[in-house]
Image (cartoon, grey):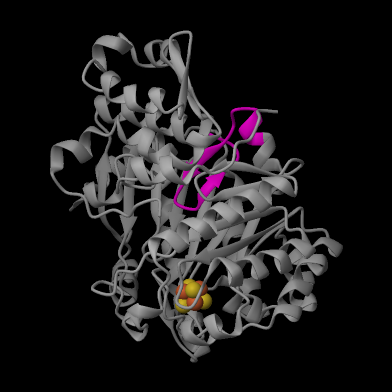
Amino acid sequence: MAKQTLFDTELVKKHDRSGPRYTSYPASPFFAENYPMTSVDDALSGIGDRPMSLYVHLPFCSALCWYCGCHKSITRDRQRIDQYLDDFEHELKIMADHLDRRHVVQQLHWGGGSPSYLDNEQATRCFTLIQDYFDLDLDGEISIEGDPRQLTPDRIEFLKKLGFNRLSLGLQDFDPKVQETINRIQPEEETLALIPAAREVGMKSVSVDLIYGLPHQSKLSFDKTLAAVLRARPDRLSVFNYAHIPSIIKSQRMFNEADLPLAEEKLAIFQSVTETLIATGYRHIGMDHFALQEDELTEALDQGRLQRNFQGYSTNAGLDLLALGVSAISYVQGHYWQNTKALGAYRETVATGELPIVKGLTCTPDDLVRHEVIMTIMCGMGLDYDTIEKNHGVAFTDYFAAEIPKLADFFADELISPRDRGFEVTPAGRFLVRNIARVFDRRLDNSGRNTFSKVI
Ligand code: SF4
């Protein structure tokens, strides 16, 4: 196992530039409208008989958390969920007509919104619909994002019996004042009890999301949240940096900006999180993800099977990702496409028998080389020039003659270290891995556009 290094705040400050999180390359702002259906069909026919990954977006939540930047719809009307499932059934049927065979699904993920807001009957309907159109491998990774306020040990048992074997819980913060300010009250004890309950019914991995940078948070308060979470020892933790963009996310205007922790405090929080997690046996996977040594995400990292997609890091590199539901983004055979974000337009489009795709991008040969370079850095934590040359028929040092000198500063600060015809991202470099990958992002450099976030 590679030695893990503590978070170096000075290096983070020095190298922290805004840039994409590289859940895709090119990043989604570069997708174009009026994406041709012929490109979608070309992509789908290229899957062949290989298994695939399926993402389903379920956008509904019962109440709005003020900080939230997800694509969601707040409703107390459960009939709206039924209606959405009717539309989802249409989309599945239309998609099945575009596919040349029934595909094996090895990874299924329900995200949102709050997928756990579906009641048992609705969840059963949604799960069964998927099985009507795909051969779902129930021994594969079947995961769901859960809102602890909607879960009980009984509900988790129900979800396990339905077929889910991985659970991800949004915890965010246990401090009562923070919870009140973000409009998300969830008591510590009941929330943490869900982790052993999930293990007891056989969930193979339980992951927890935390957010730092929220109003009233401090290193001290966040240390307490983390200590509480660690008593339940989840298999994975994602510790996200809160992005405050009230000009775009209106609910964030509920916050008093003076209550937000300053950048120095946020750095101190993330440094403390990192040190604590590493000291208590977690591995830093990359960016904001940590996992226990025995977790399959760590195994995937060590075996070079880690991949990055719109859900963050996941296992099983190389699977095509088909994504259904509002706002969902697919990546199939070098083609990206995204569904409409509007529930009304989603309904109207599937009712006419069309897929609700509103934009997309077919990677050029240059995009494909850079996609592999960027994803290899993000997931493999290093780069082997020979592999890129072999896979894409380019002479690496010629092709990237403009980019290679830009790595010098990262070498000098030991964020990457040289290896024969390539480099490795050092443990300290993992926190800045997207800044290292950004060197190879030609779309970003050519566009003059950069509305992306920073590490801190
Ligand atoms: S944080 Fe989760 S539960 Fe809260 S509004 Fe956003 S998607 Fe819904």
Point 18% across, 37% down: residue? 445
Quadrant holding the N terminus: top right
Quadrant holding the C terminus: bottom left
Q: Position of residue 303 (x, y in %)?
A: 65, 27
Q: Start and end of the magenta stretch?
A: 300-318
Residue 383 counted in the magenta span: no
- Dividing the picture into quadrants, the one containing residue 232 is bottom right
Query: Horizontal placement of 406 versus 287: left or right?
Result: left
Considering only vertical position in the picture, is 338 above or below 306?
below
- Dividing the picture into quadrants, the one containing residue 100 is top left
- Dividing the picture into quadrants, the one containing residue 6 is top right
The one nearer the camera, 361 or 430, is 430
Q: Position of residue 70 (x, y in %)?
A: 41, 68
Point 43% across, 66% down: residue? 90
Query: Horizontal placement of 450 versus 209: left or right?
Result: left
Point 70% across, 60% down: residue? 164
Residue 102 appears in the picture as rendered: no
Point 73% across, 44% down: residue? 295
Query: Horizontal placement of 109 versus 266: left or right?
Result: right
